[in-house]
Image: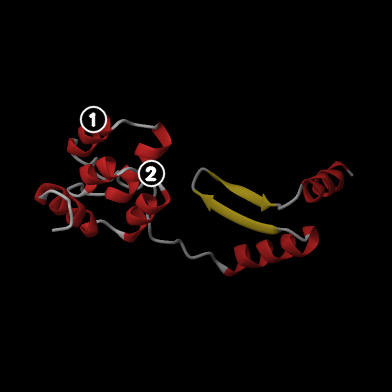
Amino acid sequence: MIGKSRSHVANTLRLLKLPDVIRDMLVDGSLSAGHARTLVTAEDPASLAKQIIEEGLSVRQAEALAQQPARPPQPPTRSSAPVEKDADTLALEKALSDVTGLRVTISHGQKGGELKISYKTLEQLDELCRRLQR
């Protein structure tokens, strides 16, 4: 009735199951319908679509990539629970931030610690270096 085969209509309708971000990629032409069809059954279609575009994969390569099992998430290397800082550490952070005009964080453990001073511009870094050289 519309001049398209039944399989073409069925394949096009399957694309509606994809997330909006992938459908947007189809509309703007960054992803072809052939590539998108390979993503319909993928566990994480959005990240696969980004990889297909970034690496310029063919449809066959995209199919092979979509067939691979997703990598299990890696366990975090550090404890995810934030460590409460004591009042002395917080006061020292504030004092150093007031003196430098920059964000200062202090973390310490049994074998030492770390002092982190964050800057946004090279001018801020230059000024900090000048102050430390006095």
Secondary-structure class at tag 1: helix
Q: Quadrant of the N terminus?
A: bottom left
Secondary-structure class at tag 2: helix
Q: Is residue 48 left or right of residue 9?
A: right
- Looking at the rendering, which quadrant does residue 63 occupy? top left
- Looking at the rendering, which quadrant does residue 130 occupy? top right
Q: Quadrant of the C terminus?
A: top right
Percent position (x, y) of residue 111? 51, 43
Q: Which amino acid does label 1 sit on?
A: Arg
Q: Name the residue under label 2.
A: 50
The CA distance from mark 1 to mark 2 is: 16 Å
Q: In this view, does 7 lie to the left or right of 68?
A: left
Residue drawn at x 21%, y 42% as measured from the top left: 38
Percent position (x, y) of residue 57? 34, 31
Task: Give the crowd class for mark 1: few <14, some 14-19, many >=20 residues within 10 Å.
Answer: few
Q: What residue type is labelled 2?
A: Lys
Q: Is residue 70 left or right of residue 90?
A: left
Looking at this view, is 114 or 2 the one in front?
Answer: 2
Above/below status of 1 relative to 127: below
Looking at this view, is 22 or 78 the one in front?
Answer: 22
State which mark lies toward you, 1 or 2: 1
Task: Give the crowd class for mark 2: few <14, some 14-19, many >=20 residues within 10 Å.
Answer: some
Percent position (x, y) of residue 117? 68, 51
Q: Name the residue under label 1.
A: 60
- Residues at badges 1 and 2 in contact (C-beta under 8 Å)? no
Say which label, 1 or 2, has the lower sequence index.
Answer: 2
